Structures are given as C-alpha cells and as structure tokens.
Image: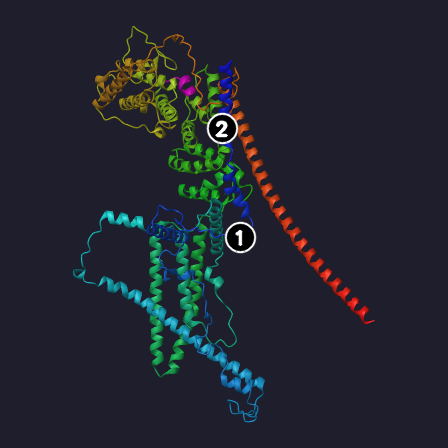
Amino acid sequence: MGKQKRRTYLIKLSNKRKESERKINPFERKATLLQEYGQRLKSNKFVDKRFGEHDATLSVEDKMMKRFALERAKGDKVNKYSLNDNEEELTHYGQSLSEIEKFDNPDISDEDDEDQGRIDGKLVSQEHFGGFLENSNYVSVGGGDNKSWKERMEELITKSKKEKHERQMEKEKSLQLTQQLDDDWKSLRFLMASGRNKEDDTVKPKKDDYDIAVRELQFEMKSKPTDRLKTEEELAKEEKERLEKQESDRLKRMQGILEDDEHKSTHLSADDLNDGFALDYKEETIEASDGDEEDKDQQGSGEDEGEGEDNDEIDEEKEETEEEQSEDGDDSDDSYGDLESEDQGSDVEEEDKQKPTLDLKKKKKVMEEARKELPYTFKAPENYEDLLELLQTQTESDQLIIIDRIIKCHHPSLAEGNKQKLESLFSFLVQYYGDLTLQEPPCLSLADKLVPVLYGLTQQSSVPAAIAVLDQIKDRQEEYDTICDRKAGRGLYPGLDTLLLLKLVAVLFPTSDFRHPVTTPTMLFICQMLAQTPVNHERDVAVGLFLCNLCLEYIYLSRRFVPEAINFLHGLLYLASKKDPNKIEPVIPPFKPVGKSINLLEIKKPVKEKIQTQLKMSEVLTTNMDRDALNNDGFRLSVISSTVVLLEQFSAVYDNYPSYQEIFSPIKCQCGKLPVSNYPESLQKQIQRLVNNITDGMETKRKPLLMQKKKPPPLKMFEPKIEEVFDDRKKRKGGSKEINEKQKLVHKYKKEMKGAIREIRKDSYMIAQVQFQEQKEKDDERKRKVKQLYGLLANQEGDYRAMKRNKSHNENKEK
C-alpha cells in the first residue's frame, strides 16, 4: 500500500515539474511582453539595419567588404536587363551620371545664338521703359517715314525669323559636311588598314585558355534583343498577301499596264517649258530594267541567259544615250545657236517616231510572258474533276506549285471555311496519288513529291485525314473480298496503286501504337493478302516480297509478331529448294505441296552472274510487261537474295522472343535444302550468315515453365512496442498502429492548444493588471489635483470672508 502511494506521488511530482517547465516565468514575461506594451506608442526607435552591425564575429574590414559587395550586386541587378551593352557608364565620385537627376539650366533650345531668343536691351530701354522723347526722331531701316509700333514689331519679327533661318541653314550645311567627311573617312579607313605593312605588325602573344575562361566568368554574358518570332497565322497572312499582290501585278501586265505607267505624271503646268526630251531616255531605260526584274521574278532560273542579254541591251542603250547627251553638251559650247536648235528638233522628231514602236513591242512581250505565267492565287477545288482540270495540262513542277499555292491561299487561320476546303483537298490528292501510279508509264517521281504535301496536310487535321485514307483502304479491301468470294477464298495480289497506298500509310501515321484507327486495319489487310493469295507466277512473288517489306516497316519499332510474313518467306525458300518426288513436304497455305508452281524459284544450273540487288516494282507490275520476261535465273537470284535479307532483319527483330527457336527452326531446315552450289558466292555467304544467326539465337538458354513452389510459412513475429516520446497518459488497448498514432497526435495537439490558451490568458491577465494600475495611478493623480484645487479655493474664500468682516467692522466703528 505504501509503495502504491509513493509511486502515485512521484507521478504527480513529475507532472508538476513538466507544468512548471511549460509555464513562462513572470519575470521573463515582464522583460518581454511588458517592454513591448510600454513601447507600443513610440515611433522614434532607431533600428540599425546595416549588414553585420550586430554580429560580433565579424571584424570592421569584413563588414566593409561585405557591404561593398552587396552594393555592387545591387548595381548589377539594376543593369541586368540593360540593352546598352557596348556603352561605357560614366561616373562621378563613384556615382553613375545617369542616376544624378540635376538639370540645372537645361539647354533645350534649338537656337545657337548668344542671346537665346532674348530681346535686345536697347529695344527694351526705348520701347518698354523709356525713349518717349526719341519717338519723333525714330527713322525706319528703309529710310522711309515714321512707322507705328506695330509695324516696327512686325519688322523685328521678320528680321529675327530670317536670322534664325540662316542659322538653321548653316547648321544643316555643317552637319551635311560632317556626315560626308565621316563617310569618306570610313571608305578610306579600309584602304589604310589594308595598306599596312605586314612586316611591321608585332606578333601578339597567344592568350592562355585559362585566362580566357576566367575573363568569360568575370564578364557575364547579357542577353541581346531580337525580333519577335512571327506566329504561324501571321506568316500565313503575309504569304497570302504576297501571292495576291503578285497575281494583281500579273493581271496588270496581261493588260499591258506597267508599273511605271501608273506612277508616271502626265500633267504639265502652263508655265512648263520643258518638253520632256531628256527624261524620255531615262524613263525608257527604267521601264526596261523594271520589266527585266519582273521577268526574273516570275520566270524560273532557267531564263538567266535571256535576262543577261536583256541587261546587256539596256547597258548599250544607256551608253548610247550618254554619248548623245555628251554630243549635245559639246554642241552647246558652240556659238551657232540656230544650228543647235535645228539638230535638237530633228532628234525630237526621230525619237517621237521610235518611242511608240518600242513601247508597243515591249508591252506585247510583257503581256505574252504574263499569259504564260501560272496564276498566283487559285480557288480550292470543289470536286476531284476540278483538281484534274487544274493539274492535267501542267508539268510536274507546275503541279506542285499549284498545290502549294492552293494550300497557302486557304490556310485555316485566314478564313472560317478553309479547314474544310483543305480536308477535301487532302482526299482529292490521295485519290490523285493513286491515279498517278496507274498511268503508263507510272509517274512515280510526282507521286514521291506529293508525299511531303500530304504529310503537312495530315499534321494540320489528323482526324479527317485518317478518315479519308481509311476509306481508301476499305474500298481496296472490299474489292479483295469480292475476288475471294468469287474464287472460293483465293484472292489476287493488288496493283501498284494499292501497294503504294499501303506504303503511304506508314509515312503519314505512326506504326508503333498498340492500336491505331488507320495503321491497324492496314496491317490486317496486308496479312490477309499474304495468307489468302496463292503464288502462281513471278509477279505474285515480287508483290509478296513487297508486302513482307511493308510488314517489316510496320513492326520494326513495336516488334509485333507477324506469322503471315514469316510463313510467306518460308514458302519462297520452299519454292527455291530441291524436292523429293517421293515425299510431300509440309507447307502452309497459300503455298501448295504439289502443282506447277512448286519449282518456280529453283535454279537447276550453276549461275555466276551478278545478282540484281533491288527489284523495281514499277517495272514488275506494269500491265504491258510479259510474264515470261521475269522467268529467268537473274530474277530468281534477286528474289532469293531479298528473301534472305528480310529473314535476317526479322531474326534481329525477334531475337528476344521466347519462341525464337520454334519460329526460325523451319527456316533453318529449309535453308539446308537449297541448291547452294548453283548460287553465286555472294549469295552463298548471305545464306550461311542467316543460318549462323539463327543457330546463335537458338543456343540462348530458356527458363522452363515450372509450377509455383509453395513458400514455407514464416514464424509469427511481433514488433516491439517502442515509444520514442514517453507519455504518461492511459494507453488504450486495441486498434491498429496507425489509429493509435493518430490518437496520440490528437491528444498532443489538444494538450498544446490548452497550454497556449492558458499562456495567452495569463498574458491578457498581466496586461489587464498593468492597465488597471495605470488607470488607478491616473485617478489618484486626478483626485490629488482636485483636492489641491479645492484647498486653494477654500483658502481664497476664507481670505475673502475675513476681508469682508474686517470691512464691516471698520464701518461700524466709524458710525
């Protein structure tokens, strides 16, 4: 029982100690809170905010150095975004002159005279404050009669304006001469620099890399202002305005209106004595040069020679005009004025006859060239026939220019309906892309140049472009399904237009997505053709190889497994291998173990000719080409070589597949059946390299699939209950660790809140006591003063009554 009491007493004692530690000492409260309360109404307190002033660890020199560094940093911060990089800052006693705002006697007048526009003192003395007796003797400057004050002031104003104008003219003349001297000096300075003797130049020591790096760190690089980059909308607007201006100029040239004819002034005043003889030559040469410039801007680079000839003709005309003018100048020195006038008159008549013919020829030439030019602005085609009408009669380069100008004139940011017009244009161009490949011969160069245009339109509106291309793919697939239904599930390989459309999809849209609305259906269509189309002749082999190459492009990044492509390449090796007539080898459709085409690629005799590395699909798929033209050993070798190359690439893509051995073991087996002895040495090396790669891939160890082993149950372990901060409150049993920690924090928060409120109340109580004591002292002082005033008044009243009694007593005595 005694132990229990002693333990309880110790717990209470420890609690009291904690409470005493939490309490603020009243002396400390008086030293802090009471001092702040006493200084609450004072505003004359001096706070020294200088750096290091209250730091006893810094010496005086350290304080001064740090203050100087802070001042320099402040100046650097101000000049951080200054654009005047090359100007030196002028200082006066360490202070920048730009910060000194003293404008004593600012000289902003344009006048350079000494009087600075002030009136003469003589005039002031005579007209303002004196000279009344001299008025009658005043004589004007012109020596005439006496003038009134108003006339004299007007005369004075005129004279001052005249002097001011003369000073201004002299100033402009001096500035012009100074500018001319500066220009002359700049032109002569380069001559002086180039004329220096190289032997006199002293060899400067090469600067050390370390010194250069230190100086670069010392002088911080400042950003220089640049022009704002224009937005896509601004660039499109400028391009459209440029094309519209060029189109208006072209239409004017077609009508025979030249640019100089618009600006030429035809009005002659009544007193104009010049007949325009000397100006005709200058105007004619200017017109010719302008015409040549216009021709150069609008025609291609292939007309440079013609332009050079025109420029030579213009130079010759200039020389002739200069010679004629010089001859006229020599004649002017002669004293026979009548002969001079006759010669000039005859020249004018000849020039008047020649000028209309020259102008007419020139205008005809300009009009013909303008008609031959392409328009600079086009309307967006509303249907496919309108596009064909624009492009059919033009060359390849002109067709690309027309398409480019249509796109620029109908940028989506220029008008509201332009985006729909460009979407329609994209679908028309995709259709035109396919039609180019159906021509005889196929126009593949133009189709190749259309790809960047289609790619740009796809980036502007991806969803409509995807819909347009997907519609084309669906049409091709529906045609293929129709053929398969008609031929009991066997299809035919498509033409060149469909193959290039499938290749275009890989360029316009991403192929690495898990699923894409255009790429995924296209890939399925390719696999369908590889799986359902039988190989009957050489053309089918070439088309199948092209589709396998497309499959490789589609899955190169995603590494998706395409069994149709691997099976087709395995079938091509089967067509090129030796067959046992007594054994049917297992092959997967579309290939057959028996039939006419099972030896389509077999080479029965040794061939040493060079292998054609690439097959041109435009030549293989032409309708005019005979099938027997591909029935040769050269074509077979090129097909076998392409097959081996594709298999090597597929092997590199699928090297990390767990089923690598199952995929390529039939390929390795089929390579062993090829008549390698009949192949050239280069092809033999390719086949051997493929076999070695497949063998290396099969040797990689694979982990077999095992049933998951049941782990032994671990022993039950209990976490030790360790409290970092001991709290003597009651522990609640049950609950998780997180809940207990949360309850502990809530309890601690409430406890601290109560303590803070208790201390605030004590502070308020102390301040209330101080305020009560102050008010009590004020009341006591007031009572003291009131009592003092009452005492003074009582004394005065007593004295007054005493005087009154004495006065009445004296009066009674007198009576």
User: Residue beneath label 2, please?
Assistant: 18
Left or right of residue 121, residue 584 in this image? left
Q: Residue furthest front?
A: 813
Under tag 1, what secondary structure? loop
Q: Is residue 811 above or below residue 730?
A: below
Between 206 and 758, the one lying in front of the other is 758
Instruction: Give the distance between the C-alpha atoms of the residues marked 2 and 1, in whole angstroms.
Output: 40 Å
Quadrant including the C terminus: bottom right
Under tag 2, what secondary structure? helix
Between 106 and 318, the one lying in front of the other is 106
Q: Residues within 10 Å of mark 2 (few under 14, many from 20)?
A: few
Q: Quadrant of residue 620?
A: top left
Image location of residue 528, percent across then percent down: 43, 19
Q: Is residue 303 above or below residue 697?
A: below
Q: Residue at x 35, y 84 (%)?
A: 335
Q: Is residue 329 visible?
A: yes
Q: Which residues are magenta?
A: 527-536
Image location of residue 733, percent across then percent down: 52, 15
User: Residue beneath label 1, please?
Assistant: 43
Between 707 and 30, the one lying in front of the other is 30
Identified by mark 2, the residue type is Lys
Q: Is residue 234 magenta?
A: no
